[in-house]
Image (cartoon, coloured by chain):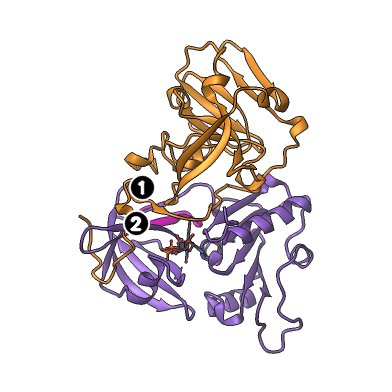
Chain colours: A purple, B orange
Amino acid sequence: MSTLWRVADVVSSMPETESARTIGLRVNGQNGKLAGQHIDIRLTADDGYTAVRSYSVARAGMDETLEITVDELVNGEVSPYLVRELAVGDQLEIRGPVGGWFVWKPTDTNPVQLIAGGSGIVPLMSMIRAHHASENPAQFRLLYSLKSPEAGFYREELQTLGQESRKLIIDYVYTRKVPKGWPTAPQRLTAEPLLATILPKDPAPDIFICGQTVFVETVAEWLVQAGYPAASIKTERFGGTGGTR
Amino acid sequence: MGIISSGFHGRRQNGNPALPPGQYETGGFPVLTAGPAPRIPIEDWEFFITTEAGQRHAWSWDAFMALPQMDIDTDIHCVTSWSKLGTSWRGVSLDTLFENVETSCGFTMAHSYGGYTTNLPLPDLLGGRAWVAWEFDGEPLERAHGGPARLLVPHLYFWKSAKWINGIELTQDDDPGFWESNGYHTHGDPWREERYS
Ligand SMILES: Cc1cc2nc3c(=O)[nH]c(=O)nc-3n(C[C@H](O)[C@H](O)[C@H](O)COP(=O)(O)OP(=O)(O)OC[C@H]3O[C@@H](n4cnc5c(N)ncnc54)[C@H](O)[C@@H]3O)c2cc1C
């Protein structure tokens, strides 16, 4: 099923930040989704030219809808269209959701450490939402690295969850600009503070890291060096400067 | 033709005949891996081929480097839709490595350091179409890209070009490897868009 292109209706569209938008899609006969999966989106221009990109599912509803959040990459081919032009009532084609590796299932019992760089929060949010909606008591902890407070996705929801949920701890790192009254200056994420704000090695958590390629590579490397078992670390790279080659 | 997005113009890159359907060209070299990159010292590295009869052929790094080396210029295509055109590699042809291997198997499983596996039909590894590569763009292959050595099977999607390659097991059946068990196509031909299972 997942390999077929299907037509999706845009049913909602909400700005998430100045450069990002959350888009709700409805697909007839939408079926089984796991938290962490992605869809492929195919756009077709009026002369038949097509472009395909992958987007993680941010919220997988029980019905035929799902949400994605797209961050605009200035001068990108596809993301500016999705963020600035696409409107409710439009249609596009999607494939998936796909992926059986970077996923969290409500039957998983290990504690979970999520580490997001920028828009890498998207598939992790889907896990947080699935976890919150389930009876699963496992401890979840999210480390969210952001340029500035305004760049955060799902701000209100995360704030509410962070305050209300006993099974979710949220930590923020701001790399360029901090909120008013924040105890530290903006700082690049480095190994030590990172290791001090995540779940300990024992009992080994399942770790999900997502963001731009360099972010994911760097963080995964720190964790391995700190003795977190490589087999417990799952990564999803959104692309970008993965080194110049 | 699919649903038309009238405000979408695109870059028209896929008019390039070197690009398989649904692929776009990137100048970078993105990394796609399921987890962190393993570290394999050259002294401990080996490459093996095992057969259904229990035979094991193995090469140490030095023995491997003593084999005939080839320069390979090729395009590579990742299932996440990027293609990189005109990449250059150096390595040993699988034809060379399979020279003294006797088998009646039709399939293989590539095994990597770190536990990654990917399945390939044996014919896709032979006939000058697959290599164990250790140099990229004139430099030793970086660890993030699979160093010390990776499989290079550029006519299939790049997840088949297993990084940190350790060896190849000949198999009777086409058993799924890692991504193939996680929703991806068993064969992975980019020209037929064999992306997902
Ligand atoms: C599995 C998967 C899930 C993804 N999920 C999301 C998601 O939930 N939200 C989201 O916003 N994006 C996500 N992405 C990234 C997305 O697929 C596109 O790559 C992104 O939107 C840029 O596409 P574009 O056409 O606008 O830019 P392009 O025209 O493709 O890119 C322009 C230039 O920017 C570089 N580039 C590509 N991607 C990035 C990047 N992420 N950062 C910096 N530079 C880049 C390219 O190499 C190219 O040189 C995901 C990618 C993958 C593989």
Q: Nearer the viewer, residue A142 or A31?
A: A142
Q: CA distance from mark 2 to mark 1?
A: 8 Å
* Mark 2, secondary structure of its residue: helix
- Mark earlier in primary sequence (2, 1): 2
B131 in relation to A85, above or below = above
- Horizontally, residue B106 falls left or right of residue A167, namely left
Magenta residues (range):
A30-43
Q: Residues within 10 Å of mark 1 (few under 14, many from 20)?
A: many
Task: Judge: label 1 CB < 8 Å from ligand 1.
Answer: no
User: Residue B30: horizontal and vertical position, in percent?
Assistant: 53, 53
Residue A237 placement: quadrant: bottom right
Residue type (three-letter) at the residue carrying disc 1: Leu
Position of residue B153 in the picture relative to residue A166 (left or right): left
**Which residue corresponds to mark 2?**
B13
Q: Can you say which quadrant of the picture contains the C terminus of chain B?
A: top left
* Mark 1 element type: loop
Residue at figure coordinates x 61%, y 12% from the top left: B54
Magenta stretch contains residue A176:
no
Residue A97 at least partly seen: yes
Residue matched to label 1: B19
Q: Chain of mark 1?
A: B
> Residue A225 in the image: x percent, y percent?
77, 51
